[in-house]
Structures are given as structure tokens and as C-alpha cells.
Amino acid sequence: MKLGIVGLPNVGKSTLFNALTRAGADAQNYPFCTIDPNIGVVNVPDQRLEVLNEMYNPKKKTPTTIEFVDIAGLVRGASKGEGLGNKFLAHIREVDAIAQVVRCFTDSNITHVDGSIDPVRDIEIINMELLMADLSSVEKRIERTEKAAKSGDKEYLEELKVLEKFKSILEEGKNIRELDLEEKGQRLIKELSLLSAKPIIYIANVDEGDMVAETNDLVEQVKEYAKAEDAAVVTISARIESDIAELDEDESEMFLEEMGLTESGLDRVIKAGYELLDLITFFTAGEKEVRAWTVRMGSTAPEAAGKIHTDMQRGFIRAEVVGYQDLIESGSISKAREDGLLRLEGKDYIIKDGDVCYFRFNV
């Protein structure tokens, strides 16, 4: 999963990115500090992997990962090229989902590009620029499709209908992701890399004092706005995450406990991202390696096998599957087999979150 971190300048994007990825990206108090996108790959924390590692004691333990992309601050007029906007918008097209960082803290030492703190205004500026960029892309495609449709080709006529629907909803100031689309519409979204079609979560960046309560008046405004489009809101203090990033695992646990927090901001962002993209985790386990893998909810056993190697999907025979909880309660894979908890599943089996799988294949 590739999650793009976007927002206005000076809202804490790069500070948060550094904390989440320990990537050391430059984070300064002036607009457009980030020009080229910073990319960091982060291990997804999963206690189940740790338990399986203790059970199998393998030579290697490999978590699944998430990729964060820190994209430069957008400004009003970005869709028309303001603030190097065209370049930055192109970077957003490459991500799977958008994490929009919203400033929900006051600090006279950190300037705001618009001179005052107003999270809803900030969100609407970013979202409008994404909409305007999409409208431009759709209008260009309509021009091309209209010429091709003059031939009477049914394919182009149908495409034109979908594009007109896109244009209509964008002109109403609504996001493409609000549309319920069939296959052709989904294909056009991918071809055009429409920004407002991407799933979105809002990350409310608060100061340290508001982190325990996980809210303040500004956060509540963001939540109210997000509710209207059924979007998730994750409250984070980028400064606290920066402090946690400098600690080892034991120290960070103590720090969180002292702060009255049960999990880090990284964990909350990853969980929200997984839910946003309908992702689940399955495991493979043996003497050589215990490994976590990410697939979309609804993936079949052959599709999950293909995540490991394309040959495994091509030559899929069957999967031996045991649920994580069943395996832990049995104490070992051999006992799970004796208890009848290890199942043989075919090509139509839908992988469930926590499945521990052994794939049989022949090529």
C-alpha cells in the first residue's frame, strides 16, 4: 500500500513523515520545503507475527510493509500551476490513498500559509484543487472521446456518458469517489488517475497537550466535515511521534504508557489505511521464515499465493489453511492438523484476515 501524505505547507507533514519512517526528510518552517517527494517504507506492526515467530522459531521473520510518500505542500491554485502545483499533483496520482494532514494546533512560531488556523478551510482548499485538476483531465478526455464518438462506435458513446457524469459531479464540487460506478467507470478512473477518486483519511495534527484526549475544538470541526463524506479521522501529535521515533521499542512503550496512550500514531494511521483500502493480512510460517502478507479483502487463495510468487498462482493446486486463533489454541501446526483445524481449500476459497497458509502448486 502506498499512502500519500498531503496538506498545505507548514501543517506538520514532513515532521510526521520523519516520525513515522525515521527517514530524516527535511522539515523546515517555510513553504515548499519538500519539492521532490520523500518515500519511506515502514514495517506494519502485528503482534500475531511476533507470536508465530516464537512458535516456529524460524531463521527469518518478515513483516508486511506500507509505503509513505511525503508530497510537497499544496496551495490555493495548485491545479493551475501555483506553487509548482502541477508537479505535486502528479505525485499524488501515483499513490493508492491520500492521508491529508490538517493543522489542528496553534503555535505563533509556526506560520500558516493563509495567516490563520481554520482546518475546514484548509481541507476545502486541498480538496478543491484535486477536484479542479480532475475536471481539467476529464474535459480533455471528453474532447478526445467526442471526436472518436462521431463514428458512432458504441464503445466511445458509452465512455462519453461516463465522462459527462464525471464532469457533472465535479462541477457540483463533489468527489468522484462518491459515485457508485460499474466496470467502465472504474477503468476510466484508473486511466485518468483521478485524484478525487482516491480514498482519503484526515490526520488531525494536534499539540502534545491535546493528544491524550485525542481531540480539541479544531479536531471536532474536522470530524464533522469528514462525517459528511464518510471519511476516517486519525488524531496525531507529530511532535510526540517525533519523540517516540528516537526511542527503542521498550522505551517507546513506557513513553506511551506515561502519556496515557495505548498505541502510537503510526499504528493508528496503518489501521485506518488498511480499513480504507479493505486490506487484510495472511501469514506463511515454517522453519525457514515466518512472514506476513497483505492482500485486499475478497482475494482468493490463488491470488494470495500470487503475492508470494506468480508461479504459485499460475500452478495453484490447493491451500492448506488454519486460522491464526485456531493455531495458537492448538499450540502447533501438527496438533491443529490432528484436531481437524487445518483445512484443504481450493481455488474459490476467500482468504480471511489472520489465515496461516501453506500453498501447494505445480508448474
Image (cartoon, rainbow, N blue to C red):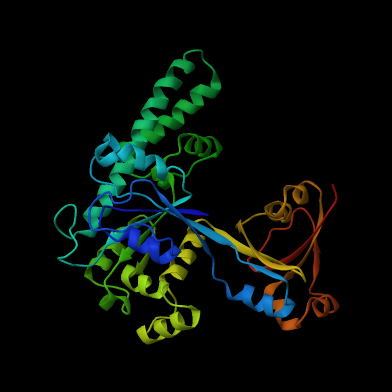
Residue 268, how many percent across, how many down?
A: 44, 69
Q: Which residue is found at the position 84% from the left and 47% from the top?
A: 363
Q: Nearer the viewer, residue 77 or 336?
A: 77
Q: Is residue 155 left or right of residue 167?
A: right
Residue 244, how many percent across, how many down?
A: 40, 75
Task: Identify the residue at the far top of this view.
Answer: 151
Q: Which residue is found at the position 31% from the left and 53% from the top?
A: 7
Residue 176 visible in the displayed image: no
Residue 37 visible in the displayed image: yes
Q: Which residue is found at the position 51% from the left and 12% from the top?
A: 151
Q: Is residue 146 above or below residue 312?
A: above
Q: Nearer the viewer, residue 262 or 301?
A: 262
Residue 294, how many percent across, how many down?
A: 61, 59
Q: Is residue 331 left or right of residue 37?
A: right
Q: Is residue 174 above or below residue 263?
A: above
How many labels sit on residues?
0
Q: Nearer the viewer, residue 348 or 58?
A: 58
Q: Is residue 29 above or below residue 235?
A: above
Residue 269, how many percent across, how many down?
A: 44, 65
Q: Is residue 71 above or below residue 325?
A: above
Instruction: Using the rendered view, name the quadrant where residue 161 is placed.
Output: top left
Instruction: Using the rendered view, name the quadrant where residue 246 is placed.
Output: bottom left
Q: Which residue is found at the position 79% from the left and 74% from the top?
A: 341
